[in-house]
Image: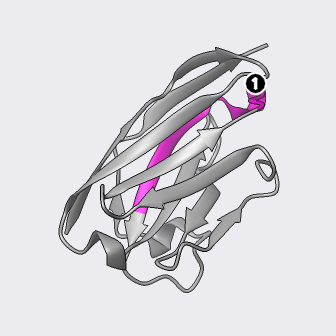
């Protein structure tokens, strides 16, 4: 079992940058697939990015080229660097971890979730 705690959110103007972190507390961090999701008010939770146990990354089209996901297994921490932020990126961001995932874009594939952290981008 693992507990996830996000940090680093906040408010920024359009075109700015923010960096999110997700610290994991528990055993076997190296064995987990990791992902970032977000949910805007009145919208469903959507997949943003993921990174597997070998460090392979994938991104939703709407963040490709702007966001970068990474993991530091020694620190049991997941990161999301967000550049060129847009007002449409405003949402609660969640990190997630799973031991097995056939499709890393599906929220149901993840076993553990952080509490979420707010990102607000103003125009």
Between 9 and 17, which is closer to the camera in this rendering? 17
Indicate the position of residue 40 as horizontal and vertical percent values.
62, 36
Label 1's element?
helix
Quadrant that contains the N terminus: bottom left
Mark 1, Cα crowd under 10 Å, few <14 / some 14-19 / many 20+, is some
Does the segment drawn in magenta span residue 93? yes
- Where 64 sits versus 51, above or below? above
Q: Is residue 11 above or below residue 66?
A: above
Residue 79 on the magenta span: no
Report whether 109 appears left or right of 82.
left
User: Magenta residues?
Assistant: 84-96
Q: For the point 34% across and 74% down, which residue is it?
A: 30
The answer to whether 101 appears left or right of 7 in the picture is right
The quarter of the picture where the C terminus appears is top right
Q: Is residue 9 visible?
A: yes
Above-or-below relation of 71 to 8 = below
Q: Give the percent coordinates (x, y) of residue 25.
A: 20, 56
Looking at this rendering, what residue extends furthest in the front direction? 74
Q: Position of residue 19 (x, y in %)?
A: 54, 35
- Residue plotted at (65% across, 50% down): 68
Residue at horizontal 58 percent and vertical 70 percent from the top = 106
């Amino acid at each position: 079992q693992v507990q996830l705690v996000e940090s680093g959110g906040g408010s920024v103007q359009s075109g700015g940058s923010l960096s999110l972190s997700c610290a994991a507390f528990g055993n076997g961090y190296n064995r987990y697939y990791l992902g970032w999701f977000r949910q805007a008010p009145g919208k469903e939770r959507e997949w943003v990015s993921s990174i597997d146990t070998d460090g392979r990354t994938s991104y939703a089209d709407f963040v490709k080229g702007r966001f970068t996901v990474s993991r530091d297994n020694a620190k049991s921490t997941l990161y999301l660097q967000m550049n060129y932020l847009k007002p449409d990126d405003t949402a609660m961001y969640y990190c997630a971890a799973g031991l097995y995932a056939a499709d890393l874009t599906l929220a149901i594939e993840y076993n553990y979730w952080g509490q979420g952290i707010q990102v607000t981008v103003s125009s």
